[in-house]
Amino acid sequence: MSFIEIKNIVKEYQSGGEKVKAVNNISLEIQQGDFVSVMGQSGSGKSTLLAMLGGLSHPTSGSVVTDDIDLFTLSSESLANFRREYLGFVFQSYQLIPYLTVLENTLLPLVPGGYSKKEQRDKAFSILDKLHLIGKTKRLTDELSGGEQQRVAIARALVNDPLIILADEPTGNLDSMISEEIMRIFTDLNNDGKTIIVVTHNEEMERFANRRIYLKDGKMEEVYNGCS
Amino acid sequence: MKMHDISFLSLRRRKAKTFFLVVGLVIATALVVTLIIVSKSISVSIAKNMDEFGANILVFPQSEELSLNYGGMNISGVSVGGKELRNEDAALIRTIKNKDNISIVSPKLVNVANVEGKNVLIVGINFNDEFRLKKWWKLDGSKPIQRNEIVIGADIKKQLNSGLKKDLKVRDKNYSVSAVLEPTGSQDDNVIFMDLAEAQVLFNKRNDLSLIEISALCYSCPIEEIVKQTSSKLPNAKVTAIRQTIESKMDAMHRFEHFSFGISLVILIISGLIVFANVSASVNDRTREIGIFRAVGFKQTHIIKIILLEVFVASVSAGLIGYVCGLLSSEIIIPIISMSKETAMQNDFNLLLLSTALSITVGFISSIYPAFRASRLDPTIALRSL
């Protein structure tokens, strides 16, 4: 049994009175510890697939089963619990809360978890230390550079110690040097046993993944297994 | 960090948005507080003026005899022995439980005397009380100061061919006319008014009274209660409320109160809509943030809690500020509307609770739908990047 099993997943949107299939009947199995890159042009359905993997968006048909949990049979509340326990999200535009500091943004996923203040701080500081952000914990996020903001987003994704990291164009707004640094962080996390799924259209970045998936018009065209 | 910390941090660090949210609620609350205080103050002021405008309670001696008539009111015969009203009775009225509601007590002695060959009604009064009671009286001349000075009605002037500064002989004693009443259209036109103590001496009825007229402030106290209390103080007297006067005053007051209530309601609805638009816009502005919360594992109920707690804190602050603003603006507006600096501002502590409750209610109603809608947003749409 695979860690993540995607079966015949379809996502349709209404566009100008017509139904458009953003994801068209994709089936895929991902093992624990995989580093998967999802490639494809804009509008190919990469982000939609990632959103369904994260339980953020419901498919029109098909299923996603993660660690034997059929995501779309869960209630909205249980799905929130699942996201908190299993997933860490990293987005292209960082998606940090502007009125919260680096520390507060980082420990955000711990807030609904019932952790004490000390536990929250210990976990957040430990991650921020690894990501070299320890001197900037009290800063508001818009005072940071793009690379630093993305590292805060990664810290937030990791603070709950999730099994899976879903990253949507995590280097899209960063220069090549910072992009390399971010991808190395993902590689380190993968080496620590995390399952990483990264959506990117940057071919430079796909070399970090051990599995590559190519999407075109919502369909999966090719799958490569093994490091390049 | 706890869930409520997010609400407080949002309010504290998004100062401009918090400011506009609070200001919207403050305006709504302050408007309503101002309207309530102003309308209540003006109501009380009008009620007080109306209450002082003529008597609304009459006190007669208990009597089986036929009555004299004065001003359309029946007055018991004056010779009924021990049942007559006394000067002390007028003083006793001021000792009832609701004595603060007693504005004017005007004791009277009514008698008939032959003046210049004609039978004329002579009424002994305390001029100061009577002038307060009958604000519609207009004098040609001056208010009597000496005990031998009298005021005559307009018809008396004609019938007795009398006038200002002229003397009239009553029971062999000369009285100087200090003022002539302008026509009132009432029986006052056919009456000679003189000092009460002088009348009691003149008619040999020392300490006796024919009736007592009372002006009670009945706006905040049921008139029946004052009548009951007065009756228990004066067991030998018949105490009657003048229904027609009271009903017409109360009717006028109720109309004014309904009018004020209507205006308050309209302003409340308009303010509520403005606040609704403001709060809705504020929540709608936060869809991306809500998407982030959802993505990192916040439940829908968490999102609603965060938003509603923010609105609650803003509403409570706005309620308190709105109350203070309402008080200040009332203080400015009341003298302008009432055209009198003497109109007292009617304020009580309950209004503070009311303004806070109102602010919370408006804030809650305005935000509950946007908060629910926001919590149910598809996180991918909220984030827009996925």
Image (cartoon, coloured by chain):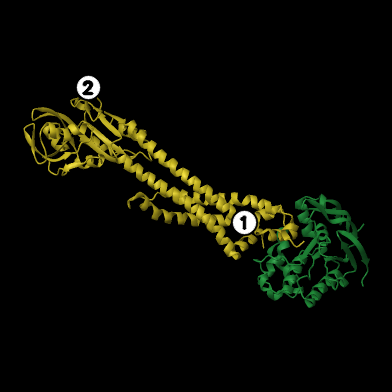
Chain colours: A green, B yellow
**Chain under callout 2:** B
Residue occupied by mark 1? B281
As shown in the figure, which amino acid type bears the numbered disc 1? Ala
> Residue B300, percent across and down?
71, 53
Residue B163, horizontal then vertical, whole percent: 11, 38
Marks 2/1: CA–CA distance: 78 Å
| Chain identifier of the residue bearing label 1 in the image | B
Q: Is residue A228 left or right of residue B334?
A: right
> In the image, is B120 to the left or to the right of A82?
left
Mark 2: which amino acid? Leu
A79 sits to left or right of B227:
right
Residue A79 image point, x, y percent? 78, 54
Q: Residues within 10 Å of mark 2 (few under 14, many from 20)?
A: few
* Residue with the mark numbered 2: B66
Specify which label sits upstream in the sequence, 2 or 1: 2
- Determine if residue A49 is in view: yes
In this view, the mark in front (2 or 1): 1
Circles 2 and 1 in contact, beta carbons < 8 Å: no
Camera-nearest residue between B155 and A217: A217
| SS assignment at label 1 | helix
* Residue B297 showing in the rendered view: no
Point out the residue furthest to the left here.
Answer: B172
Q: Residues within 10 Å of mark 1 (few under 14, many from 20)?
A: some
Q: Quadrant of residue B190?
A: top left
Relative to B50, say whether A203 is above or below: below
The percent coordinates of residue B99 (x first, y second) are: 32, 40
Image quadrant in which the C terminus of chain B is located:
bottom right
- Residue furthest bottom as drawn: A177
